[in-house]
Amino acid sequence: MRVLVVEDFAPFRQFILSTLASRRDLQVIGEVSDGLEAVQKAVELQPDLVLLDIGLPSLNGIEAARQIRKLLPESEIIFLTQESSAEVMQEAFSLGARGYIVKAKAGSELLTAVEAGLLGKTFVSSSNGNR
C-alpha cells in the first residue's frame, strides 16, 4: 500500500514514518507539512492511503480531504489529530474517512487503523470509542 503522510509537526511526522517502516507492505511515497501541498502531492503521487493531520497550515486537513476525495475518490484517508470533538470527527467521516486517530493514542493505534483501512473497515481512536 502506497502512503502519503501529511503532518506539520516534524517530530511527530518522523514518528509516523518510523512506525510505518515496520510494515513491509506499506510504502511511504511522500511526506508534506501543509494542506495545499497534501492536495498537490496526492494528485501527483496517487497514494492508496493518506494519513492526514487536521490542524495544518495553508489549508486545514478537513478541507484538504474534501479536495483529495473529489480528485482521488479511490484514495483512503485516515485522520491523525489532537482534535477529539464529536463534530470534527463526524465531519471527517462524512467525507468518507476510514479512520480517526487521536495523536495521544497513535503509538498503539496507528498500525491497527491502517490495517482496518486495508480491510475496508472504519477505525475510531479508543478515546472516542471504536465503530
Image: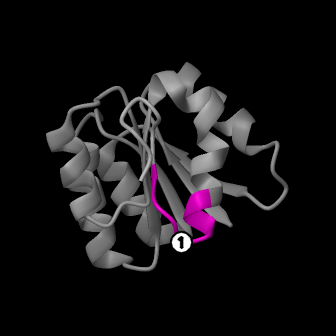
70 relative position to 29: left or right:
left
- Quadrant into which the N terminus falls: bottom right
Q: Is residue 44 above or below residue 41?
A: below
Residue at the (22%, 63%) spot, across then down = 94
Residue at the (61%, 70%) spot, across then down = 119
121 relative position to 36: left or right:
right
Across the whole image, how many numbered discs are drawn on residues? 1
Residue at the (37%, 78%) spot, across then down = 73
Residue at the (29%, 51%) spot, across then down = 36
Residue 13 x, y percent position in the rendering:
56, 31
Depth check: 130 or 62 in front?
130
Residue 110 x, y percent position in the rendering:
60, 40
Residue 54 x, y percent position in the rendering:
30, 39
Q: Which residue is mark 1?
A: 120
Check if residue 122 falls in the magenta segment: yes
Depth check: 80 or 55 in front?
80
Q: Is residue 110 visible?
A: yes
Q: Is residue 88 above or below residue 62?
A: above
Helix or strand or loop: what does disc 1 sit on? loop
Q: In the rendered view, how is the structure colored?
A: one colour
Q: Is residue 59 visible?
A: no
Looking at the rendering, the stretch of residues picked out in magenta corresponds to: 116-123
Q: Is residue 53 above or below residue 43?
A: above
